[in-house]
Image: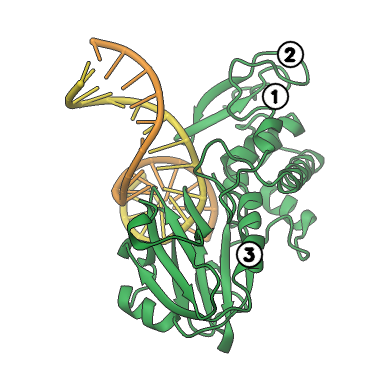
Chain colours: A green, B orange, C yellow
Amino acid sequence: MPELPEVEVVRRGLQKHAAGRYISRVSVLSERAVRRHLAGRSDFESTVAGHQVVEIRRRGKYLWWVLDDGDALLAHLGMSGQFRVSAPDAVDGDRHPHLRVRFTFSDAGPAIDFIDQRTFGGMAFLPGQAELPHPIAHIALDPLDPAYDLAATVARIRSKNTEIKRALLDQTVVSGIGNIYADESLWRAKVHYARSTAVLTRPTVRRVLEAATAVMSEALANGGTSFDALYVNVNGESGYFDRSLAAYGQQGRPCPRCGTSIRRDAFMNRSSFYCPHCQPKPRARR
DNA sequence: CAAACTACCTGACTGC
DNA sequence: TGCAGTCAGGTAGTTT
């Protein structure tokens, strides 16, 4: 599912295929895709049309189109959202079944489609918020941001009273990490998902965060992670990082480091994959 | 105030 | 073959 590396792949694709172009028409096929745009579907269509796309920015799993006049078009892919360059010969009767929003441009180039099966994704037009849209002011810097502060993030995690994986998934602590990269980071750092942040040492938390940065950088270099057609880049192509996963989705397979069978636990209403030998369960605390 | 829980969604898959 | 149940999981909003 789209986490930081996958969203960054999409950002780069949009930067290449949408930046500099003038939006001539916006068609919202599903009102739910613009539910965060409080003025509604037709207002979204008429307000966004006519703008030029200046550039595409990203923080964590959010991305936003910087429009001329300093306005922003904020988007989140949710679980299954995609931005796709529409096929050159696409016609109305030929649309993707989960097409939610189509952006048509004033030039002869292809439209950009927002496609989303599970409809957790969406977008909103935010006037004058190109620098940092207000709805994501609470989202922490991500590890690939030049201003990301590792030491401060270590301190923030250690000040919390929770389990390490919950802290990694908390987008107000560090952004961009989802279930896949949380598990991979913890496996690399040899830390169990339920270890208490309050008692982890500074070097241990640092090791986990450095692993997160490394694994997401490697995934980005491989075009992101995808298990199926739900995650693809703007040209509909899959990344290759799933072949490099050591823990996530690998239950029953040998740990690449020690050979012990990878386990899967239910945690936080989702799955956690880990090596019971490399990442021993914390001792129960009273 | 912080931590934890839940609703929101659709489609693939499993078991009977 | 069909159908109910389970799973996938990021975020905002609510509850504890």
Chain letter for mark 1, please: A
- Label annotation for residue A58: 3
The one nearer the camera, A271 or A92, is A92
Dividing the picture into quarters, in which one does residue A91 lie? bottom left
Tell whether B4 sits left or right of A97: right
The quarter in which the C terminus of chain A is drawn is top right
Q: Earlier in the sequence, mark 1 or mark 3?
A: 3
Tell whether A135 sits left or right of A119: right
Q: Earlier in the sequence, mark 2 or mark 3?
A: 3
Which residue appears farthest toward the right when viewing the image?
A203
Which residue in the protein does label 2 denote? A259
- Secondary structure found at label 1: loop
Q: Looking at the picture, which amino acid does disc 3 mark?
A: Arg
Residue A139 sits above or below residue A200 on the image: below
* Mark 2 touches mark 3? (CB < 8 Å): no
Which residue appears farthest toward the front when viewing the image?
A89
Tell whether C4 sits left or right of A99: left
- Secondary structure found at label 3: strand
Tell me what residue is drawn at x 61 percent, y 43 percent: A238
* Mark 2 touches mark 1? (CB < 8 Å): no
